[in-house]
């Protein structure tokens, strides 16, 4: 299956916390980044997810936010790294972040946001992703 989501990160399931309706699934990449995903208990069962199972975290670039400095946020996924590329367009830019754990993440950010935050290659940043924006594929 080919999909348009730019962020497809391979790893292994390290934990699953089940709630009444949803589960919190943690996937750890080979480089050591951990991505948390909130998916339905039904999906956990249908995908056969269990600790140790190989899976892929799938995240659309439009769901990745870029943060600078210290932040207190409710978003479960906050991965420190460095901006390595900014591909500017008329309205939006594709920002490439290399995390400290070695993952490459792409974020679609408005040009206004790029300018206001001073986003440029070499800038230390965090890729911020809500757990509900992380899909799990097997």
Image (tube, grey):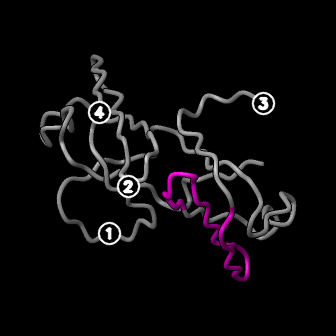
| Marks 2 and 1, how far apart at CA | 9 Å
Residue 105: percent from left, percent from top: 44, 40
Q: Residue at x 30, y 53 (%)?
A: 126
Kindly indicate whether the residue at mark 1 contacts the one at mark 2 (C-beta within 8 angstroms). Answer: yes
List the residue tagged with mark 4. 84
User: In the picture provided, is 13 more to the left or to the right than 86?
Assistant: right
List the residue tagged with mark 1. 73
Within 10 Å of the Cα at label 4, are there few (<14), some (14-19), or many (20+) other Cα atoms? some
Which of the marked residues, 4 or 1, is nearer the chain's N terminus?
1
Kindly indicate whether the residue at mark 4 contacts the one at mark 3 (C-beta within 8 angstroms). Answer: no
Kindly indicate whether the residue at mark 1 contacts the one at mark 4 (C-beta within 8 angstroms). Answer: no
Which of the marked residues, 3 or 1, is nearer the chain's N terminus?
3
Q: Residue at x 73, y 82 (%)?
A: 20
List the residue tagged with mark 2. 128
User: Relative to residue 10, is residue 39 depicted above or below?
Assistant: below
Circle count: 4
Residue 137: percent from left, percent from top: 73, 48
Within 10 Å of the Cα at label 2, are there few (<14), some (14-19), or many (20+) other Cα atoms? many
User: Relative to residue 54, is residue 121 depicted above or below?
Assistant: above
Give the dominant element type of the magenta stretch: helix, strand or loop: strand
| Marks 3 and 1, how far apart at CA | 34 Å
| Marks 3 and 4, how far apart at CA | 28 Å
Most extreme residue toward the bottom is: 20
Q: Could you say whether the residue bearing mark 4 is in a helix, strand or loop? A: strand
Which of the marked residues, 3 or 4, is nearer the chain's N terminus?
3
Disc sitting over residue 1 in the figure: 3
Which of the marked residues, 2 or 3, is nearer the chain's N terminus?
3
Q: Which residues are magenta?
A: 13-35
């Amino acid at each position: 299956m080919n999909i348009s989501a730019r962020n497809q990160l391979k790893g292994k399931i390290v934990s699953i916390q089940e709630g009444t309706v949803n589960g919190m699934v943690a996937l750890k990449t080979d480089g050591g980044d951990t991505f948390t995903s909130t998916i339905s208990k039904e999906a956990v069962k249908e995908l056969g997810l269990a600790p140790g199972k190989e899976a892929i975290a799938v995240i659309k670039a439009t769901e990745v936010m870029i943060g600078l400095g210290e932040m207190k946020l409710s978003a479960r996924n906050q991965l420190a790294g460095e901006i390595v590329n900014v591909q500017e367009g008329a309205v939006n830019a594709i920002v490439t972040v290399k995390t400290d754990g070695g993952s490459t993440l792409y974020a679609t950010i408005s040009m206004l946001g790029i300018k206001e935050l001073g986003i440029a290659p070499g800038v230390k940043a965090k890729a911020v992703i809500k757990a509900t924006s992380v899909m799990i594929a097997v």
